[in-house]
Image (spheres, rainbow, N blue to C red):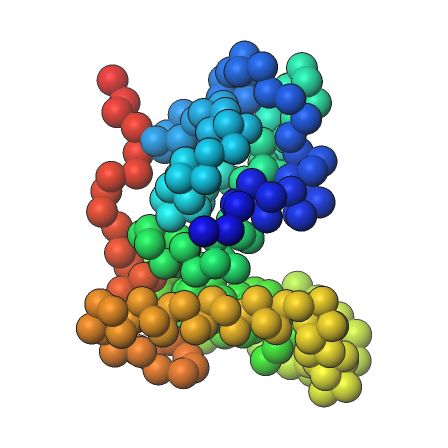
Amino acid sequence: MENLYELLEQDIRFEEGLNACMNCGVCTAICPAAEFYNYDPRKVVDMVQGKDNSEIESLLKSDTIWYCGECMSCKTRCPRGNTPGFVIMALRTLSQRLGYFTESEKGRQQFAIKRTVGDNIFKYGYCAATYAVNPSMHPEQGPIWEYILENSDDVFERLGGQINGIGTGPLRKIPEEALEELRKIFDVTGGTDFFKSIEENSKRKAAEQGIQFSPSGTDNDYFVEVYTANSNNHTGNQE
């Protein structure tokens, strides 16, 4: 097995995020995620600092590293200048690179994010294209989102938007040459290969679970499974 700690050290966020933890627990005390989830940034940093390959692998395969909201409250409080949020970023990236993210419920949801937010970048030039959001997938929005989509031209025009129009303004149509430039940036920086890795590992996991998988889009059983799965085992015991 590769030395996972050495792989983490290759990530600049890890190098900047972990100086020397003294286990004071201030990061956990301030962490919003720790209040609700089975999550303790102090323990995560302590496990990583121990450099034990099996411990780090267990983190990479766990739900734990996906609970952090990356608010960076930990960065502002640590007396040693550590940033547990950066450590989490490095762990997440390594988990995706090695395919370990498919071993946890929250990790598998990275596939759903890639197929929505990630694909939106190449298709529309926006991470979150409001007109591409399916209301049935976001019931938490209530009826207002469906109303907005049904009346998009009127609503966004009054807000100064130019939905899919040519020229300036929010939600304007991004020219094809700009989209091609985005694709080239992803190619050069490794983003394209990173997306491919998420796809390939998710396809492998779908086959392992015997779930239907399609090469694109959200209309397939594996996407629905990872998007809706909830074991209800993620939150802490609230007294």
Q: Position of residue 88 (x, y in %)?
A: 54, 40
Q: Position of residue 218 (x, y in %)?
A: 38, 75
Q: Position of residue 181 (x, y in %)?
A: 76, 79
Along the viewing direction, whichever of 153 and 51 lies nearer the viewer = 51
Task: Identify the residue shown where x is 41% and y is 55%.
Answer: 100
Looking at the image, is 76 positioned above or below residue 155? Answer: above
Q: Position of residue 31 (x, y in %)?
A: 51, 26
Along the viewing direction, whichever of 192 and 77 lies nearer the viewer = 192
Please indicate, yes or no, whether residue 107 appears anywhere in the rendered image: yes
| Quadrant where the image shows the C terminus | top left
Looking at the image, is 42 positioned above or below residue 189? Answer: above
Looking at the image, is 175 positioned above or below residue 228? Answer: below
Task: Identify the residue shown where x is 59% and y is 72%.
Answer: 193
Along the viewing direction, whichever of 110 and 177 lies nearer the viewer = 110
Task: Identify the residue shown where x is 69% and y is 75%.
Answer: 187
Q: Is residue 120 left or right of residue 160?
A: left
* Quarter of the rendering containing residue 75: top right
